[in-house]
Amino acid sequence: MDIKQLSSLVRSLVLDSDEVLVPGLGTFRAEVVPASFSDKGYTVNPPYRKLNFVAEELPEAKPIEADGLKECVEALKKELKENRAVEFPGLGKLRLTKGDQLFFVADEDANIFPEGFGLESVSLKNKEGGEKHEKKSSPKKAEKSKKVKAKKPLTDDQKGMIAIGIIVGIIILIMILLRLFGTLTPDFIDKLLYSPEELARLHGNL
């Protein structure tokens, strides 16, 4: 047996059991981590199964039984002392610290949670980076927002009616101003309406 076969045995057993014992080495433990939030609460991460290792032979763990296991473990320990790390293909890496303490670094792609297959993180932000969920607003603001959204662009007939109304208003304003000037300064209006000869005739000077 080699490390690749041992890793395959651990993986197959850990799919059905939360604790798998490698006699003479320690116990691999798998636990389900529930769904969580990240990115300030804007990303939902799915649940996953995390693999750990303890350098103890836990009594409730399911032991591995296979030919050549003892020799494989001895070779593994020797490699740990020489290289300070041993790769478990498909599971992660077992390391040995300077203080001769074992710790396990799980592979992020380790597939030990079939129930979570296909689950992916979900972002609560839209493409522009804003929130997908709408913030709650007061009833008045909501009603005002609906009214603004209900407005439609003006048609050509409506634009024409508005233009006519503006023109009529300007004409009426001019007439009022002329009448006002005629009352206050009649000579000024006469000069605008008549020529000098006509004004002389009006005033009886010719």
Image (tube, rainbow, N blue to C red):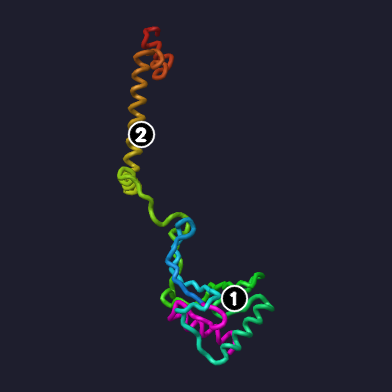
Q: Residue at x 58, y 85 (%)?
A: 4
- The C terminus is located in which quarter? top left
**How far across and down, in percent of the image, does residue 118 sit?**
44, 74
Circle 1: residue type: Leu
Q: Earlier in the sequence, mark 1 or mark 2?
A: 1
For mark 1, what is the residue? 94
Specify the amino acid type for callout 2: Ile
Q: Is residue 172 above or below residue 10?
A: above
Q: Residue at x 42, y 14 (%)?
A: 197
In the picture as drawn, the residue positioned furthest to the top comes out as 205
Name the quadrant containing residue 103: bottom right
Q: Decide which of 49, 155 is in the foreground and name it.
A: 49
Whether residue 14 appears in magenta in the rendering, the answer is: yes
Kindly identify the residue that appears in the image at 53 percent across and 84 percent down. 8
The span shown in magenta is: 1-27
154 to 81, vertically: above or below: above
- Kindly give the residue lying farthest to the right in the view shown: 82
| Residue for badge 2 | 167
> Whole-Å distance between the Cαs marked 1 and 2?
88 Å
Contact between labelled residues 2 and 1, with CB atoms less than 8 Å apart? no
- Residue 67 appears in view: yes
State how many labels appear: 2
Most foreground residue, 60 or 150: 60
Which SS class for mark 1? strand
Q: Crowding at label 1, few (<14), some or many (≥20) Cα neighbours within 10 Å?
A: some
Residue at the front extreme of this rendering: 59
**In front: 171, or 21?**
21
The correct choice, above or below, for 109 with respect to 150 in the image is: below
> Dot 2: what SS?
helix
Quadrant for the N terminus, please: bottom right
